[in-house]
Amino acid sequence: MITVRKLIKRFGPKTILRGLDFSVEPGEFVALLGPNGAGKTTFLRVLASLSTPTLGQVEISGYQLPGQAAAVRRRLGVVLHQPLLYGDLTAEENLKFYGRMYALPDLEARIVETLELVGLATRRRDLVRTFSRGMQQRLSIGRAVIHGPDVILFDEPYTGLDQDASAMLDDVLRKVAAQGKTIVMTSHDLMRIADLASRFDVISRGVIAASATRTNVGPDNLLAFYREAVNGGDRGKEEKTERVKEAGR
Amino acid sequence: MEADNMQYAITNTQPVSPTRAYFRALTAIIWKDLSAELRSRELLSAMLVFSLLVILIFNFALQLDARERINMTSGVLWVTFAFAGTLGLNRSMSTEKDRGCLDGLLLAPVDRSSIYFGKAIGNLIFMFAVEAIVLPVYSLLYTVNLFNGGLILVIVLGSIGYVAVGTLLATMAVQTRTRDILLPILLFPLTIPVLLSAVKASSGFMDGDALATIMPSLNLLIAYDVIFVALSFMFFDYIVEE
């Protein structure tokens, strides 16, 4: 479903992704973990076709990026830090607008179903600027799934949510995952993601430093796995620095 | 209907024809901008208040006699439209950027020039709306008759050129930290040809000059509009690319 080979992304002189390899099978729910600045958001933006790879191959649902970006976008739903919603439009109007951007048929029925899915049917005619952060995030998921994408990308969807809002978001994510969608989600909330994802990949210094499936890693040892992956990367770098210093001597 | 029990009918859709998708996206953006503005009235009210203040200040500051008022009219009008237009362009693109909505537009599977044209037509509608209110108010304040077919044509052509470049530059400026000051710095030098031609053609029509005298300015306005709409069509994709 998603295949990434030797992905490099540079911003000017700064290299963020350093030959990253990544693949996801249909129906998988992959959690992308990693410290701040590891390259998670940059990687997700490349997958979302919002950022162009400097080098390397990216293929989603059989279509290449950036060459076949429009075909990829049709099969992709994206939820970012920001809700990507218009505060001066109602929930219904926001979905109607995005539905028209995707030229969707039966838009009214889709809007009703989507609002039911994200639990906002009773607030359909309320302006989005009156919504709480949690409600906006749920509507943002509705916006991302209204066109029936095969793959959904989530970038830190729990940011700024309280416990109740996070629990409601969990419910929505479980419903979306139950539809057989392929999901890639970045998160810092290890405990929450441990219950949701089927695979855990750790990005460190622009590459996938470690990967484990749910059969190997669960809520009990996810933190240890994550620390080992991140610190292992740091140790590797320190050892490399030492080797360079020794060679210099 | 319970969300858990429903048969979720949303599946991948067959792509509609590219032309149809293009125009649906374009009209969706116009509809969205107009709906949001009808509700908030932030953009139009700012442009309108600013425009009315400018013509009021010029009226009291210049203390002109009847003949001088006619001579000054085209200059005052175009200064007013240009500054009010900048306010509107900045606000229009800020709305897209502030809540990440520009990313939402870029994620849609449509040719990105449809986003440009949707935004530009929306901005043009707002500019026309302000001009439609400013013209009669100006006529009353300055006792100058502005209901002249030629002048209206110049305002339409000048506004198209101004908004065509302005929408492109506002998209560029909004991605920087200094967007509020960057837009006028980029926009005014680039729109000097359109503003000068518009002022000259407007004066010509108000003075009752022969069409042959006005035609060079009108031709320049038309050429400017065609060139900058074409350039914006070609370069918008590069400007929004990260």
Image: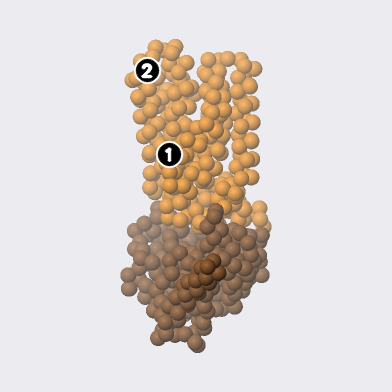
Chain colours: A brown, B orange
Looking at the rendered structure, the secondary structure element under dot 2 is helix
Residue A223 placed where, x, y %? 41, 80
- Determine which residue is flagged by label 1: B181
For the point 43% across and 39% down, the residue is B181
- Determine which residue is flagged by label 2: B62
Question: Distance of mark 2 from mark 1, alpha carbons?
Answer: 28 Å
Amino acid type, callout 2: Leu
Amino acid type, callout 1: Ile
Quarter assignment of residue A2: bottom right
Looking at the rendered structure, the secondary structure element under dot 1 is helix
Up/down of B180 relative to B132, above or below: below
Residue B226 placed where, x, y %? 64, 35
The reply to whether residue B207 is visible in this rendering is yes
For the point 60% across and 19% down, the residue is B214
Q: Is residue A5 shown left or right of residue B70? A: right
Q: For mark 2, does the 10 Å Cα neighbourhood hold few (<14), some (14 to 19), or many (20 or more) residues?
A: few
The residue lying toward the viewer, choosing from A28 and A43, is A43
Chain to which the residue tagged by mark 1 belongs: B
The reply to whether residue A31 is visible in this rendering is no
Residue A215 placed where, x, y %? 50, 88
Residue A81 placed where, x, y %? 43, 62
Q: For mark 1, does the 10 Å Cα neighbourhood hold few (<14), some (14 to 19), or many (20 or more) residues?
A: few
Quarter assignment of residue A51: bottom right
Q: How many tags in the picture?
A: 2
Q: Looking at the image, do the residues carrying marks 2 and 1 touch, with CB atoms under 8 Å apart?
A: no
Up/down of A38 relative to A217, above or below: above
For the point 39% across and 12% down, the residue is B65
The residue lying toward the viewer, choosing from B196 and A92, is B196
Quarter assignment of residue A3: bottom right
For the point 38% across and 44% down, the residue is B42
